[in-house]
Image (tube, rainbow, N blue to C red):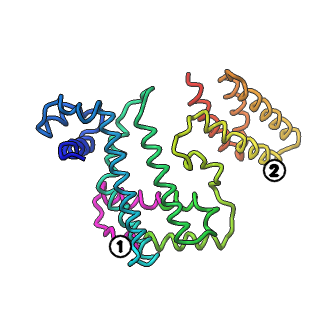
Amino acid sequence: MSIFKKKIMASAERLFTEKGYEATSIQDIADDCSIAKGSMYKFFPSKEDLYIEILEDRHQTMIEETDRIHDNASLSPREQFVEEIAYQLGYFMSHGFFVTNSRRELPPQTNDRISPHIFRMRARLLNYNRLLLIRQYGEALEPYGWDAVIILNAIAKEYLYLITAKSKPLSVRELAVYIAERMDDLVAGMLARGSCPMLTRDQMTEYAVDEPETVRQSMERCKGMVFERVASTIRELSVPNVRKRELEQVLELLKEEAQQEEPRRFLLHALLNDLGAEHELMPYASQMRMWVEKLLPV
C-alpha cells in the first residue's frame, strides 16, 4: 500500500471517529492530509469506498496478527489463548469503537454497501473466536460454541466500554487473563450441566457464511423453528383445553397468512396480539411482530 493511501486512511479513520461518518466530507479528509481533493479520488472513488477499505484493512490486520499468535510455537496453548484475547482487546481499543460510533450516525440507505461489510467482519470474528474457544476447551464445547462466543464478546465489550468511555484504569494484560479465567468457569459449568444450548447451528446459519441474509431470508429460515416452539408451548400451557384449541387455530391462521405473497399486516398483528395475550407466548409473538414491522412497514 502506498504512503499516500496509508496517510489518507489514517486521516479518515481519525476524522470518522471524532466527527462521525456523515459529518466528515472528502474535502475534510483532503484538507487534513494536505492533498488536493481530486487526488483523493485516484485512490478512493467515494467516501463509502474509503470507509469500506478501512474496515477491511483493519480487520485483515487483526486476523493476520491473531494467526501469528496462534502459530507461535514458543507459546503454550493457554498462553496463546490469553495472548489472542489481549490482542483483540487492544485492537478494539484502538480501532473497533470508531466503527460503532461513526456507523451509528449513518442514516438509513436503500443501497447501503457498508452494512454487508460490517456483517461479514462480525461473522468472521465470531467464527474465529468460536473456533478459538473450541480449540482451547475441546470438541465437547462444539454444541455450545455459539453461546460461548457470544458471552465472550459481550464480556469483552462491556469491559472495553468502561476503559474507553469511562476511563477505568484497567490493564489489558490483566483483563485478558481475567476473561480467560471466567471463560474457564463458564465452559466448565456448561459442560457439567449438559443443558441444551440457546444458540444452535441452524439458528446461526447466516454467521457461518460470508454473505448476510436479508430480513426475509432470515425470517423464512427461522420461522419454522419459532412456529414449532409456539405449538409445543401451547400444548404445555396451564389453560382450559378450549383456549388451547383457540390458540392452535390462531397459530394455523398465522402460518397460512405468512405464506401469502402479500400478507395482510393488520391480520398478522391481530393474530400476534392474541398469541401474546398468553404470558408464555409473548416472547415469540414479540419476535414475529418485529419481523412484520421490518417486512411490511406502514
Boundaries of the magenta span: 153-178
The residue lying toward the viewer, choosing from 8 and 257, is 8
Q: Indicate whether residue 158 is drawn in magenta.
A: yes
- Look at the numbered disc 1 and give the secondary structure of its residue: helix
Residue ID at (29%, 30%): 45
Residue ID at (84%, 41%): 244
In the picture of the structure, the residue carrying the numbered disc 1 is: 174
Give the percent coordinates (x, y) of residue 230. Answer: 75, 43
**Position of 237 relative to 175 (above/below):** above
The residue lying toward the viewer, choosing from 170 and 114, is 114
In the picture of the structure, the residue carrying the numbered disc 2 is: 236
In primary-sequence order, the first of circles 2 and 1 is 1
The residue lying toward the viewer, choosing from 233 and 88, is 88
Amino acid carrying mark 2 in the image: Glu
Q: Judge depth for marks 2 and 1 and give the one in front.
A: 1
Label 1 Cα crowd, 10 Å radius (few <14 / some 14-19 / many 20+): few
